Image (tube, rainbow, N blue to C red):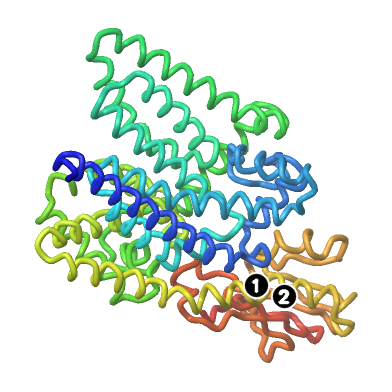
């Protein structure tokens, strides 16, 4: 007869192996789903810029990724490029790998915050299948990779606060520097948590020395990561000028105003639109709010870690792009919802399992149509550029273009003579000219001769809502009208 204590150890080990196998299968299935829905082309402005940077090297004066140019993303893509991978595929691999690792980051952070592994995994699955997170997690963008670095850095910092181990603080400094190198905005959002971890560590014997070593290592690594961006952009003066220009843009265009903060549409753009379905969004958010009642202490820990990045994102990043920028922010409601279900499982295990599975299925079901459309069809902007290049009826004709497409022309129509349409409206056009427009702009023209669009209306909610329709008009030699919008 097997002794009781040995039998309990065997049962615990078996449960651990079963949980590990289930986690592996869930993540393998998720990876297969993500890899079967990859972006076919660079759809948005930032995607084109990042592909250009991977192809030509990091120079923010030319390819204009925002300062400091996301050097680690570009350098990882450049490494793949040097191995023979095409620039777009290289950028896509880096972005998609970041998207997959960010799901693991939610699991890691969740367990550090006290969730059991199965429910941390459930929160990660909620996160992974949010339509906006899925959409942007399979594209050549920096957000997924930066989110992954942020979540792992935050998880290690939480562990430092709990244990005050100097070795973990050094690891946290390393991960924070990586986050700065992938997306500086996410790196800055880690600093409040890093300060708490540093104070906690400094209280231990020799802790002050450990804090100084970790801080110096993090700063030096961050400087080393940024140096290629500075050098490749013409030196410190040019880099600072570009940084100041970007700062002015954020202040004038992206920064939230006080009036925005009291508008429901502003908050809906951040916390409803990424889910595409309002009922789905409110269900998950109500479940997340329930954690503040049934698991108040753990819920406050989750908010303490993720509230700084939420506040920073909401105040600094543009609400029009919120579904993309919310990739880090949305980890919070997902972990809180998982906390609520974990509490429910203590008394109603089957109900909690059914609710969790049902919510994952609802998220995935909502996300599949728009994701598949974007995966299977060329983006409207790329389709329009391809037609202008290859259609005999459109080649070689005078071309006027909407400024939103400016970044696409040199990539897809190199050498094509084209005129940027000014803000004042369409200038006089020669007979037979073509006008290409996006974002609902008509420039006073009617009856487009070509229209390229995504049909799924939810894409307007889970993306920036731009580049959903691109039209080509034929102008007849008259002056055009003012810019009008039909979107």
Q: Locate residue 1 relative to residue 450 in the image: left or right.
A: left
Q: Which residue is drawn at the image coordinates 41% and 76% (left, top)?
A: 366
Give the structural element (helix, strand or loop) at label 2.
helix
Residue at x 18%, y 49% (from the top left corner): 299
Residue 58: % across, % down: 70, 39
Q: Position of residue 336 (x, y in %)?
A: 24, 55
- Dot label at residue 336: none
Q: Nearer the viewer, residue 487 or 100?
A: 100
Left or right of residue 259, residue 81 in this image = right
Looking at the image, do the residues carrying marks 2 and 1 touch, with CB atoms under 8 Å apart? yes
Q: Is residue 115 above or below residue 454?
A: above
Q: Nearer the viewer, residue 354 or 126?
A: 354
Q: Is residue 105 left or right of residue 285?
A: right
User: In the image, what residue occupies the spot 42% across and 19% down?
Assistant: 215
- Comparing 193 with 265, the one in front is 193
Q: State the CA–CA distance, disc 2 to disc 1.
A: 6 Å
Relative to 281, 102 lies left or right: right
Q: Which residue is mark 2?
A: 383
The image shows residue 284, relative to residue 201, as above or below, that is below
Within the image, what quadrant is residue 381 found in?
Answer: bottom right
What number of labels is visible?
Answer: 2
Q: Position of residue 239 (x, y in %)?
A: 64, 33
Quadrant of the rendering where the N terminus is positioned = top left
Asked if one can make out residue 181 in the rendered structure from this viewpoint, the answer is yes
What's the mark number on residue 379? 1
- Packing grade of label 2 (10 A; few <14, some 14-19, many >=20) is some
Q: Position of residue 269 (x, y in %)?
A: 37, 65
Q: What secondary structure is found at the residue carrying circle 1?
A: loop
């Amino acid at each position: 007869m097997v002794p009781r204590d040995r039998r309990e150890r065997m049962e615990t080990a078996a449960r651990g192996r079963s949980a590990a196998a289930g986690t592996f299968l869930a993540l393998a299935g998720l990876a297969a789903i993500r890899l079967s829905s990859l972006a076919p082309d660079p759809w948005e402005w930032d995607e084109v810029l990042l592909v250009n940077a991977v192809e030509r090297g990091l120079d923010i004066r030319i390819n204009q990724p925002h300062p400091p140019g996301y050097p680690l993303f570009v350098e990882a893509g450049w490494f793949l490029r040097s191995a023979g991978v095409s620039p777009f595929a290289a950028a896509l691999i880096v972005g998609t790998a970041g998207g997959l690792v960010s799901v693991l980051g939610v699991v890691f952070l969740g367990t550090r915050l006290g969730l059991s592994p199965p429910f941390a995994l459930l929160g990660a699955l909620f996160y992974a299948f949010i339509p906006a997170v899925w959409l942007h997690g399979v594209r050549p963008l920096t957000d997924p990779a930066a989110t992954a670095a942020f979540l792992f850095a935050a998880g290690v910092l939480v562990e430092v606060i709990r244990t005050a181990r100097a070795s973990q603080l050094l690891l946290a400094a390393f991960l924070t520097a990586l986050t700065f190198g992938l997306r500086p905005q996410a790196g800055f959002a880690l600093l409040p948590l890093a300060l708490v971890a540093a104070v906690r560590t400094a209280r231990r014997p020799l802790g002050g020395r450990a804090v100084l070593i970790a801080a110096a290592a993090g700063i030096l690594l961050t400087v080393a990561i940024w140096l290629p961006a500075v050098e490749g952009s013409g030196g410190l003066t040019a880099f600072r000028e570009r940084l100041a220009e970007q700062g002015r843009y954020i202040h004038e265009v992206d920064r939230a105003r006080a009036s925005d903060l009291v508008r429901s549409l502003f908050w809906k753009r951040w916390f409803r639109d990424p889910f595409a379905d309002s009922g789905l969004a409110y269900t998950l958010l109500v479940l997340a709010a329930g954690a503040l009642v049934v698991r108040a202490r753990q819920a406050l820990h989750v908010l303490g870690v993720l509230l700084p990045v939420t506040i920073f994102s909401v105040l600094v990043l543009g609400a029009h792009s919120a579904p993309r920028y919310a990739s880090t922010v949305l980890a919070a409601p997902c972990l809180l919802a998982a906390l609520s279900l974990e509490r429910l499982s203590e008394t109603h295990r089957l109900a909690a399992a059914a609710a969790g599975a049902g919510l994952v299925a609802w998220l995935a079901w909502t996300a599949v149509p728009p994701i598949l459309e974007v995966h299977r069809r060329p983006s409207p902007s790329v389709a329009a550029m391809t037609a202008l290049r290859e259609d005999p009826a459109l080649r070689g004709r005078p071309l006027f273009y909407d400024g939103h497409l400016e970044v696409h022309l040199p990539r897809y129509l190199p050498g094509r003579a084209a005129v940027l349409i000014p803000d004042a409206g369409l200038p006089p056009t020669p007979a037979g000219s073509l006008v290409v427009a996006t974002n609902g702009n008509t420039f006073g023209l009617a009856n487009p001769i070509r229209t390229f669009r995504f049909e799924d209306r939810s894409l307007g909610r889970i993306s920036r809502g731009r580049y959903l329709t691109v039209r080509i008009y034929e102008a007849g030699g008259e002056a055009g009208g003012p810019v009008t919008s039909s979107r």
